[in-house]
Amino acid sequence: MQQRISTIEEYQKQINIIVEYINNHLDQAVDLTKLAEISHFSPYHFHRITRAFMGEPIGTYIVRVRLETAARLIRYTDMSVAEIAYRVGYDVPASLSKAFKQQYGISPSEYRTNKDFTIMKAEKKDMQLKIKAPKVLEIEAKQAIYIKLTGEYGSLDFSGSWQRLWQFVKEHKLFTAGMEHIAIYHDDPKVTESDKLRTDICLVVKKDVKAQGDIGVKEIKAGKFAVFHYQGSYSNLDAVYDTIYARLLPENNLKLRDYHCFEKYLNHPDRTEAEKLKTEIYIPVE
């Protein structure tokens, strides 16, 4: 039990370092690369870890803290809106005013004079997720044919891409037992703009194959992975990742290594009810 506590405390200690740095540098541009460096979190996992522990993306947290600090200064000091804007990191007072109204539905000057206005945050409801305790496995290298897609994850043609990969398998006589449907998501949708999100739709094959056109060939490297089995709708996967990074990894004394995660799909979404979909999530660990 002590090992689990120490691991959770280690994660939280690094999160506290990040939070303190942000709080002490609100009047400056906060560089996310700098935050990743001082936290000592792997760059592959920095955004997911911080979001899981902080309950929101790191960029959203920075904006929120700036605006909440501005709200306190507006309500409880005589500082001008311009002074407050500079104090919380806005180069132009108009930028603070615009962000403040978008966040709270009221301008800074109106908030200063309207003493009855209360800034409220909606409660976040807990989700009941079916996630099994992880199995830590040494995974052999996998060869995959893949199609690279770019764009918002929910709008991508996963089905059409896998159909094309299966057609390629048929044409080149690549079929063997044990082929796997895998997706590699290279970006965090709460960090990267939706039209720039990168996804590799992969089909693991065991025969030698060469790239052709937009169908590439890549290796998923061997290594140790914590494998989480999740049953439920794909729409809840963001919450699943938050649970994994904030609770299940530290509780199981697992430390991340520098490699990307990937998902393996165990049944067909067109022939399976959403709550019965089964996904294995592979998280690289030391």
Image (spheres, rainbow, N blue to C red):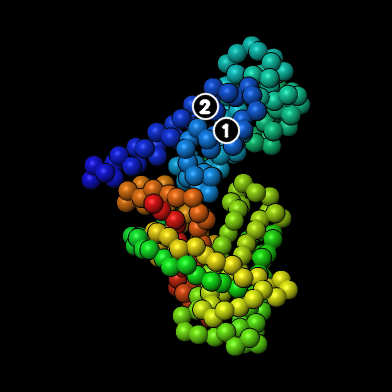
In this view, the residue farthest toward the left is 1
Name the one closer to the observer, 223 or 84.
223
- Does 59 sit left or right of 228 as displayed? right
Q: On screen, 59 above or below 250?
A: above
Q: CA distance from mark 2 to mark 1?
A: 10 Å
* Chain-order first, disc 2 or disc 1: 2
Give the percent coordinates (x, y) of residue 117: 60, 28
Mark 1 is surrounded, within 10 Å at the Cα level, by few (under 14), some (14 to 19) or many (20 or more) other residues, namely few
- Does 191 sit left or right of 18 as displayed? right
Which of the 4 image quadrants contains residue 269?
bottom right
- Does 111 sit left or right of 49 as displayed? right
Label at residue 188? none
Q: On screen, 48 above or below 240?
A: above
The kind of secondary structure element at disc 2 is helix
Mark 2 is surrounded, within 10 Å at the Cα level, by few (under 14), some (14 to 19) or many (20 or more) other residues, namely some
Q: On screen, 153 above or below 189?
A: below
Q: Which residue was labeled with disc 2?
A: 21
In this view, the residue farthest toward the top is 78
Label 2 or label 1, whichever lies nearer to me, is 1
Picture residue at 65% right of the left edge, 70% below the top: 216
Q: Which residue was labeled with disc 1?
A: 34
Disc 2 marks a residue whose amino acid type is Tyr
The kind of secondary structure element at disc 1 is helix
Name the one closer to the observer, 186 or 217.
217
Q: On screen, 245 above or below 232?
A: above
Disc 1 marks a residue whose amino acid type is Lys
Q: Is residue 14 visible?
A: yes
Looking at the image, do the residues carrying marks 2 and 1 touch, with CB atoms under 8 Å apart? yes
